[in-house]
């Protein structure tokens, strides 16, 4: 089967202190990114579209599903490790301000800012990956999720110990090929040609 892992489009920023888990929607730019991806993928046969239940992932998945006449199936195991955090601060801002959460994030100390432990998260992502491969044997599916989920899933596929090892672009595509015999390989990483390609004018 072919598994297309998609990071959600650009979401709104949510500052700390809300007192409840942050679940941002997409920005206007994010909605444009999601539409560009849907238009790009319309030329591929897609059997199913699955998504994290978080709003930014669902809003990215829906245009893809609609373009193929499919529904979005919610998979709880695709939520991000910091799903209970009361804020959403873009990675770009964390880097620019040298936020201490960035070091904790890279080092896997996610519990220090309210996230899931790296051990539990890795086990959950691995189990979810196994379930998707088993359920969709012989199919091509799109799974819209989050940067941490994609990092860990691909680390499992290629055998890396480091959990957060690359920076997925918003709406990037990373493709995994999984055989019925259990062999898995990484076919592409962090594709974003749909955001760079020029649209043809009528």
Image (cartoon, rainbow, N blue to C red):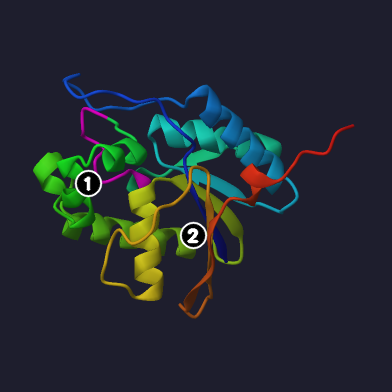
Where is residue 193 shown, x and y percent of the image? 64, 51
Q: CA distance from mark 2 to mark 1?
A: 35 Å
Q: Which label number is shown at residue 38?
A: none
Q: Which residue is mark 1?
A: 102
Q: Residues within 10 Å of mark 2 (few under 14, many from 20)?
A: few
At a point 27% along the width and 56% down the height, the residue shown is 124
Q: Secondary structure at mark 1?
A: helix
* Sequence-first disc among 2 and 1: 1
- Quadrant of the image containing the N terminus: bottom right
Magenta-colored span: 78-87
Where is residue 22 shown, x and y percent of the image? 28, 27
At a point 21% along the width and 27% down the height, the residue shown is 86
Q: Is residue 128 magenta-colored?
A: no
Image quadrant of residue 75?
Answer: top left
User: What secondary structure is the magenta-colored segment mainly?
Assistant: loop
80 relative position to 185: left or right: left
Q: Which residue is mark 2?
A: 135
Please identify the residue farthest to the top as the structure is shown.
18
């Amino acid at each position: 089967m072919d598994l297309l892992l998609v990071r959600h489009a650009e979401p709104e920023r949510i500052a700390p202190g809300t007192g409840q888990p942050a679940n941002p929607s997409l920005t206007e730019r994010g909605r444009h990114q999601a539409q560009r991806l849907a238009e790009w993928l319309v030329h591929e046969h897609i059997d199913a579209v699955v998504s994290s239940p978080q709003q930014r992932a669902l809003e990215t998945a829906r245009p893809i599903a609609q373009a193929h006449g499919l529904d979005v199936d919610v998979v709880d195991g695709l939520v991000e490790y910091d799903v209970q955090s009361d804020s959403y601060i873009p990675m770009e801002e964390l880097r620019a301000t040298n936020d201490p959460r960035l070091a904790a994030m890279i080092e896997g100390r996610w519990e220090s800012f309210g996230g899931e432990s790296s051990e539990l998260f890795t086990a959950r992502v691995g189990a979810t990956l196994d379930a998707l491969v088993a359920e969709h044997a012989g199919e091509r599916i799109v799974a819209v999720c989050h940067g941490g989920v994609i990092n860990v899933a691909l680390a499992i596929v290629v055998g890396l110990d480091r959990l957060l090892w690359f920076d997925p672009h918003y709406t990037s595509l990373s493709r995994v090929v999984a055989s019925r015999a259990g062999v898995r390989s990484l076919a592409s990483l962090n594709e974003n040609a749909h955001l760079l390609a020029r649209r043809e004018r009528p």
